[in-house]
Image (spheres, helix red, strand yellow):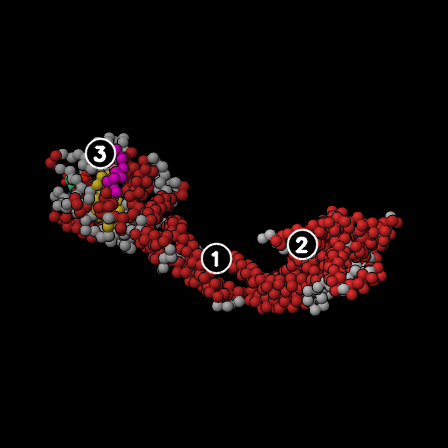
Amino acid sequence: MGQSEEDCFPTQLIDGKGEFNVEGLDTFVKKTKLSDSGLSYAVVAIMGPQSSGKSTLLNHLFNTSFKEMDAFAGRSQTTKGIWMAKCVGIEPFTLVMDLEGTDGRERGEDDTTFEKQSALFALAVADIVLINMWCHDIGREQAANKPLLKTVFQVMLRLFSPRKTTLLFVIRDKTKTPMDRLEPVLREDIQKIWDSVRKPEAHKNTPLSEFFNVEVVGLSSYEDKEKVFKQEVAELRQRFFHSISPGGLAGDRRGVVPASGFSFSSQEIWKVIKENRDLDLPAHKVMVATVRCEEIANEKLHHLATDESWLELQKAVEGGLAPGFGRKLSSILEKYFSEYDAEAIYFDEGVRKEKRLLLKSKALDFVYTAYATMLGHLRSNALESFKVRLEQYLNQGKGFANAVRDSQQSCLLVFDKGCEDAAVKQATWNASKVREKLCRDIDSHAASARTAKLSELTANYEKRLTQALSAPVESLLEAGGKETWPSIRTLLKRETEAAVTDFLDVVTGFELDHATTDAMVQNLKDYSRSLVEKKAREEAAKILIRMKDRFSTVFSHDKDSMPRVWTGKEDIRAITKDARAEALSLLSVMAAIRFDESPDKIESTLFSSFMDGTVSDTSSHNRSMGTSTDPLASSSWEKVPPKDVLLTPVQCKSLWRQFKSETEYTVTQAISAQEAHKRNNNWLPPAWAIVLMIVLGFNELMMLLRNPLYLLGLFVAFLLSKALWVQLDVPREFQHGALAGVLSVTSKFLPTVMNLLRKLAEEAQGKTTQGVPEYSASQSYRHQSPSHSVSNTVAESVSSNISSLADDDAEYSSPAPVQRRNTSNVRETEITEM
Ligand SMILES: Nc1nc2c(ncn2[C@@H]2O[C@H](COP(=O)(O)OP(=O)(O)OP(=O)(O)O)[C@@H](O)[C@H]2O)c(=O)[nH]1
């Protein structure tokens, strides 16, 4: 012997009670590295009667260290259950199992259960089964090996598809009878036993050779001829080298379980045997393959999840773009897939492929998040790049549509390259969905950018139109003449067309459809019109002020635009009429928007209503007749669309009334001014008074002429008379008849003379006292009570003039009672101050 246990690792696989030593087997597999052998391993089992030298043979044949019986201690059972060990020095890996001997005294004759179970196990697991038998048992009816063989054949038939096992009969203690003569006898015995075994219908006529290769070898007695024994064993050992190669002892074996599945396979087989179930080896093989491939796949997945390269790549992707992502990840995956392939290669192909697909799917699922993150980075980067490029192109003056196209093209190119770089070789992942999303994002951004740019563009053109139209239109409306609306139309058309032409030039770059472009152009045109409309409405709101201004301008200035001086020669009635006509013209201009040239009757209606007086007459007449045909009693103008109406006829009517009321004061002022001017220039008494004075005062005149002192006195008397004339307001007193005049003058004469004399005296006295201001005639004139009477007289005169002007306007010009009263008050004040 002499072999150390470290070399062959003898291990009890199944103990005497039938318990499988899983832990022991795993340790054995690990220590012997059996799993690495793939299919390059052989399993040899030996069975035979108890104490028939099985262990001795194995130890010599395979350099193992199974326990052997000590011959001097008596013949008893040495091997219990099933032991196993690695054959030392045999290539490829050969595993040998030493089975508990049959016919043992220890279990009793009737207990053959374990014997059968272990025999079935050996047939299911081993490629070569050594059947140890004494030479003298050959040909004997009662030989110890006959029940054994019967058992072997019976259990073999329980395998659905038995492996092609090599039965190597080892004839111990061979005699001088040559093996050539013994072997046929033995084969005959074997055949007889095969024939006697009850077989299932399917195998009724199946020959023994279908399931077994039968080999026979004879060995001399170890005890008697040890040297020869060793020599023969050494020769036999040679047959175990490359036993699984074609032509070897187990060259035609079938259904080998890969070495990495040996442990699980043998456990399962023993389990089935113990449960006394039928052992379907092909199904078992698939089952082993399934379990093992799954184990291998799971192991690979586990390693992948903790792979350092993978963790590094995953971290990089979480932080942003990871260059070479696809290449790196493919390499990592390839490593584990290759390992799986290498480890699972000997398992059932169908199962192996199926489990590989599963592994691939799980591995790809596992890394997909990182891939998706990578695509997410690519997508967001591409979108950002699109935004930047678009802005750059637009800043460079590129047309919008072209800029979008070029930006999209270049950023998609970068995205596609990125996707190529991120592509994982083992996966069929498609980045098209992400690309579609990117395209949608790009479209969305382009659309919002286009909307923003178009809004900006429109705003610019609207601003331009505002600048081009606003002030000129306002100025034209302020001018308010016949040419106002034609000029506005010309201006509107010219500026709008210029803006539209330029707008179309710019908007071409957006490549909008015709409908959109037309709508935008129409919006621009509408904007221009709305601008004019807005201005017109603003001006219409200020029409009263404008009318008054216009009135005031025309009324207060002559043809040469010089301010009028009311000398009394002016025809206030005509001037007032002209000024009102101008104001009315302005009102007619502002009454409606005239975007087209179609004529309307606004001006004629207003003039006929307010200036000719015909309407008022007609109105009065109609009122008296109970009918109403007043053209201004309406909220719309004939031939003017409601939307273009700025001031309805009713509003015009009201405005005109207000205008007249508010301009009346100006006219009053003018009349007052004219009266005052006249009065100041008319200092001579009336002619009849002069004649009377000459007739009655002829003698006095002559006396005066003769005496210069009288002349001086006369002059003084004249001055006094003049003062009294003015103070008494003689012409006015005589307006209502001579008698009334004389009575009035007479009644006022004495108080006036007294008052005058008193004031003259006071003045004379004041001159002698210091600090007394000089008394002025004008002051006296202003503060005298008769002056009040004069004022009243002048006011009445002005009032009568206004009344005569107002008569022209009949009912329209009648101011409200309150207004009249106010006006009268103002008139009084103004004139008093003059
Ligand atoms: N006559 C004879 N005796 C042998 C031979 N080989 C071994 N023996 C003896 O047989 C006895 C049993 O040997 P083992 O090798 O323990 O036999 P075994 O079959 O393994 O015994 P169990 O494991 O108990 O079944 C020992 O005393 C050996 O010396 C042989 O070739 N001829």
Asked whether 215 or 387 is in front, the reply is: 387
* Residue at x 35% of width, y 52% of height: 314
Q: In the rendered structure, are the residues bearing label 2 and label 1 in contact, judged by CB atoms less than 8 Å apart? A: no
User: Horizontal and vertical percent for residue 781?
Assistant: 70, 54
User: Horizontal and vertical percent for residue 594?
Assistant: 72, 62
Query: Mark 3 = which residue?
Result: 104
Question: Which residues fall within the magenta stretch?
Answer: 15-26
User: Horizontal and vertical percent for residue 356?
Assistant: 38, 51
* Residue at x 80% of width, y 61% of height: 700
**In the figure, residue 317 lies in which quadrant?**
bottom left
Helix, strand or loop for disc 2: helix
Label 3: how many Cα within 10 Å (few below 14, some 14–19, many 20+): some
**Quarter of the picture for ligand 1?**
top left
Tell me which numbered mark, 3 or 2, is placed earlier along the sequence: 3
Query: Mark 1 = which residue?
Result: 438
Query: Alpha-carbon distance for marks 3 and 2?
Result: 171 Å
Helix, strand or loop for disc 3: loop
Asked whether 129 or 26 is in front, the reply is: 26
Q: Which amino acid does label 2 sit on?
A: Gln
Label 1: how many Cα within 10 Å (few below 14, some 14–19, many 20+): many
Residue 17 shown in magenta: yes
Tell me which numbered mark, 1 or 3, is placed earlier along the sequence: 3
Q: What residue type is labelled 1?
A: Leu
Looking at the image, is mark 3 or mark 2 nearer the viewer?
2
**In the figure, residue 707 lies in which quadrant?**
bottom right
Res 412 visible: no
Query: Mark 2 = which residue?
Result: 779
Tell whether circle 3 marks a residue whose Cβ is less than 8 angstroms from ligand 1. yes
